[in-house]
Image (cartoon, rainbow, N blue to C red):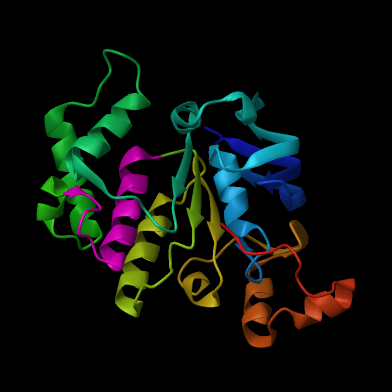
Amino acid sequence: MAGSTLIIKDLHVEIEGKEILKGVNLEVKGGEIHAIMGPNGTGKSTLSAAIMGHPKYKVTKGEILLDGENVLEMEVDERAKAGLFLAMQYPSEISGVTNADFLRSSINARREEGDEISLMKFIKKMDNMMEYLEMDLDMAQRYLNEGFSGGEKKRNEILQLMMIEPAIAILDEIDSGLDIDALKVVSKGINKMRGEEFGCLIITHYQRLLNYITPDHVHVMMQGRVVKSGGAELAQRLEAEGYDWIKQELGIEDETVGQEA
């Protein structure tokens, strides 16, 4: 069975009247892992927020299509139900809602009424996934992200990914602040998801994550656009040489987009 396809066409996005994205074009298909890299302030996190419908980000032009459906006409929860998933750079803490309750509700939200996951099947799957990610099983009964360390929050985002099984996942700096052991565990979880029915867009600053997750495509964003694309070797060259060679090659001056949200 073929996976979903996310198509972004000439996407322009502004925040408080300031244009951040200036014509992003991208296509992510099931079975593919894409990495987006680029200097600070180029719009990488803005792209992820716009895809998921954060109200702070106003789309002024362009399209976002998921299997031909207009994502921009969907509410945030409808985007999630349609198969989009965002692992945020700074996950929110939700007091009073346990990790387990959140996960089960998220799974059932994507199922038809009467086809909810059984409690026993859910618990078995959650326990297996938590063990795979080397997580303390007690975390299932803790309030969502409350009191979690940075590494625990990141592992928890990957736990959500593995439990919910979205069609297209956007991982916004999932490697930020992780030590090498946690990085390996998070990468292991993402690699376990690889398959024809799963597409992934990883936003990262560093090659080190891509040492463990080999991307099919690497894209460089500058000045609110994708300015260069290639294979895994592009990320390796960026790690070795930085971004100046791309700026020189394309005649791009210093970044003027501003700080990313």
Residue in the foreground of this view, choosing between 240 and 259:
259
User: x, y (%) of residue 26?
Assistant: 71, 48
Residue in the foreground of this view, choosing between 232 and 173:
173
User: x, y (%) of residue 43?
Assistant: 66, 58
* 195 displayed left or right of 36: left
User: x, y (%) of residue 78?
Assistant: 48, 26
Q: Is residue 159 magenta?
A: yes
Residue most toward the front?
16
* 13 displayed left or right of 197: right
- Seen at 35% across and 16% down, the residue is 112
Q: Quadrant of the C terminus?
A: bottom right
Residue in the foreground of this view, choosing between 88 and 190:
88
> Would you place residue 247 above or below residue 214 in this image?
below
Give the number of marks.
0
Residue in the foreground of this view, choosing between 199 and 39:
39
- Residue 34 seen by the camera: no
Q: Is residue 168 magenta?
A: no
Q: Quadrant of residue 56?
A: top right
Residue most toward the top?
114
- Residue 173 seen by the camera: yes
Q: Quadrant of residue 256?
A: bottom right
Judged by its main secondary structure, the magenta piece is helix
User: x, y (%) of residue 85?
Assistant: 46, 42
> Which range of residues does the magenta coloring cover?
143-165
> Would you place residue 3 above or below residue 38 in this image?
above
- Seen at 44% across and 39% down, the residue is 166
* 19 displayed left or right of 154: right
Residue most toward the right?
251
